[in-house]
Image (tube, grey):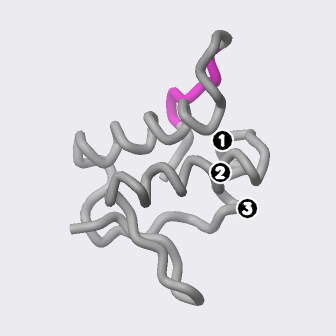
Amino acid sequence: MTAGDFQLQPGPAYAYAQLAEYIEARIIDGTLAPGARLPGERALAEEYQVALGTVRSALRVLREKELIITTPSKGTFIRR
């Protein structure tokens, strides 16, 4: 997974919400296939040049939408 064209936009939207929307769009368009493992939180923070807390909040939003599942000691995966 690469940051591609992701850039934080100025305005009222929180950074975590922008990141969650970007990853959600990659899931919907098939760039991130069901069952694919996402990089770790620190790797995502570095890749997208955001804080670790931003990544954690974005992943929380995606879990709440049931787009991803996180398994302790195994990682975070795109839901089928």
**Residue at the spot x=21%, y=68% of the render?**
80
Write the start and end of the magenta stretch as one range: 4-9
Q: Earlier in the sequence, mark 3 or mark 2?
A: 3
Q: Is residue 65 above or below residue 13?
A: below
Which label belongs to residue 42? 3
Q: Residues within 10 Å of mark 1 (few under 14, many from 20)?
A: some
Q: Earlier in the sequence, mark 2 or mark 1?
A: 1
x, y percent for residue 65: 35, 52
**Where does label 1 land, which residue?**
48
Q: Quadrant of residue 54?
A: top right
**Residue at the spot x=76%, y=53% of the render?**
52
Compare residues 48 and 65 and report the one nearer the observer: 65
Q: How far apart are the two marked residues, 3 and 1, measured between alpha carbons?
A: 10 Å
Which amino acid does the dot numbered 1 rest on? Tyr
Asked if the residue at tag 1 contacts the one at tag 2, i.e. Cβ–Cβ closer than 8 Å, the answer is yes
Q: Is residue 11 above or below residue 29?
A: above
Q: Is residue 38 above or below residue 8?
A: below
**Residue at the spot x=65%, y=31% of the render?**
15
Q: Secondary structure at mark 1?
A: helix
Compare residues 39 and 12 and report the one nearer the observer: 12
Q: Earlier in the sequence, mark 3 or mark 1?
A: 3
**Where does label 2 land, which residue?**
55
